[in-house]
């Protein structure tokens, strides 16, 4: 088994998670999901690095790029963050 480091964008993980949840219908977690992928590929997961990257912005942003950036910059608009109940 070859030792492996994985760097994954949080948005990409959402796609991977959705794919694997459709397969077996169970809730997925970061670490276990990538451990399973490594196991299937005969790799030893040494460390998983998860990062959040802003959406791509072209020199002249489109309306969609502006929309995605505004959601990224305002955490209250993002689906993945739950606002605390007071």
Image: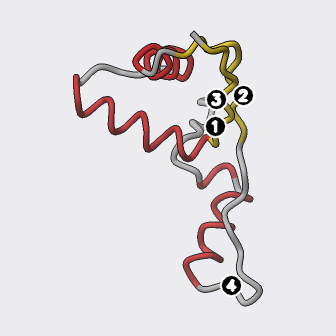
What is the secondary structure assignment of the residue under circle 4? loop
As drawn, which residue projects farthest toward the bottom?
60
CA gap, disc 3 and disc 1: 33 Å
- Report which residue position mark 1 lands on: 8
Whether tag 4 and tag 1 are in contact, CB under 8 A, the answer is: no
Front one among 33 and 81? 33
Q: Is residue 3 above or below residue 71?
A: above
**Direction from residue 34 to residue 48 in the image, left or right:** right
Mark 4 vs mark 1, CA separation in Å = 25 Å
Residue in the picture at 62% in, 15% down? 2
In this rendering, the label closer to the viewer, 4 or 3: 4
Q: Which residue is mark 2?
A: 49
Distance from the alpha carbon under mark 1 to that under mark 2: 6 Å
- Asked if marks 1 and 2 touch (Cβ < 8 Å), the reply is yes
Mark 3 highlights which residue? Answer: 86
Q: CA distance from mark 4 to mark 2?
A: 29 Å
* The N terminus lies in quadrant: top right
**Of tags 4 and 2, which is closer to the observer?**
2
Based on the displayed image, in which of its 4 quarters is residue 68 positioned? bottom right
Q: Which residue is mark 4?
A: 61
């Amino acid at each position: 088994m070859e030792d492996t480091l994985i760097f994954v964008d949080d948005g990409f993980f959402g796609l991977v998670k959705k794919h694997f949840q459709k397969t077996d219908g169970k809730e997925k977690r970061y670490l276990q999901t990538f451990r399973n992928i490594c196991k299937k590929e005969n790799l030893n997961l040494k460390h998983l690095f998860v990062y959040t990257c802003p959406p791509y912005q072209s020199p002249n942003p489109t309306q969609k790029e502006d929309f995605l950036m505004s959601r990224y910059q305002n955490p209250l608009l993002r689906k993945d963050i739950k606002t605390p109940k007071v």
